[in-house]
Amino acid sequence: MATMATERTLRIITIALFIPALVLCVASGIKTEKTKQGWMGSRPPVSYFGTVPAFLSALTSAVVLYANRSKSLRLGDDARAKTQRAVMLVIDVILAAGYIALLVPLWILDAGIVRWNGVAAMLLAYATMPLLINLYVAA
């Protein structure tokens, strides 16, 4: 179980990674869309959807940091603290499942599109890094 200082550090990292994840996922989606040239029909690249779990992770982390800051001003009830930890466990498991549900199709579908384009493949690889770090934090 993580200490409060470790949890706070991991939550700050999650918030800080939202901007790089947003920029890299959108840029990768644009480059992949330009690369596909009719491949896979009109389906948008999966990398665009990487912004959704990244935003939800950042939002959840901001709420947790705010709640812990205001809670530290007063002594909390033990039952309330256990309930809050249980809720955060459920939210983190849902976020981790969301990251896995996004990353696997991203690696399969978008990697198939950019296979012969080195720039698009490298951008796709860089776009997955903030998502993988957030998956590690949520799991």
Image (spheres, helix red, strand yellow):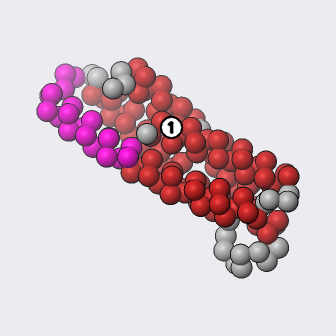
Q: Which residue is mark 1?
A: 136
Between 76 and 2, the residue placed more toward the observer is 2
* Residue 88 magenta-highlighted: yes
In the visual, does 77 lie left or right of 136?
A: left
Judge the density around disc 1: few (<14), some (14-19), many (≥20) Cα neighbours within 10 Å: few
Between 75 and 113, the residue placed more toward the observer is 113
In the visual, does 96 lie left or right of 71?
A: right
x, y percent for residue 72: 29, 23
Quadrant (top left, top right, bottom left, bottom right) of the N terminus: top left
- Residue under the point 71% across and 79% down: 41
- Residue under the point 85% across and 57% down: 117
Quadrant (top left, top right, bottom left, bottom right) of the C terminus: top left
- Residue under the point 82% across and 73% down: 37
- Residue under the point 27% across and 22% down: 73
* Residue 138 magenta-highlighted: no
Q: Is residue 114 above or below residue 127?
A: below
x, y percent for residue 121: 78, 53
- Main SS, magenta region, reads helix
Between 5 and 132, the residue placed more toward the observer is 132
Q: Quadrant of residue 88?
A: top left
x, y percent for residue 14: 52, 37
Between 69 and 41, the residue placed more toward the observer is 41
Residue 13 visible somewhere in the drawing: yes
Amino acid beneath label 1:
Tyr
In the visual, does 99 lie left or right of 70?
A: right
Q: Is residue 14 above or below residue 1?
A: below
Per the rendered image, the range of residues in magenta is: 74-93
Q: Is residue 32 above or below residue 74?
A: below
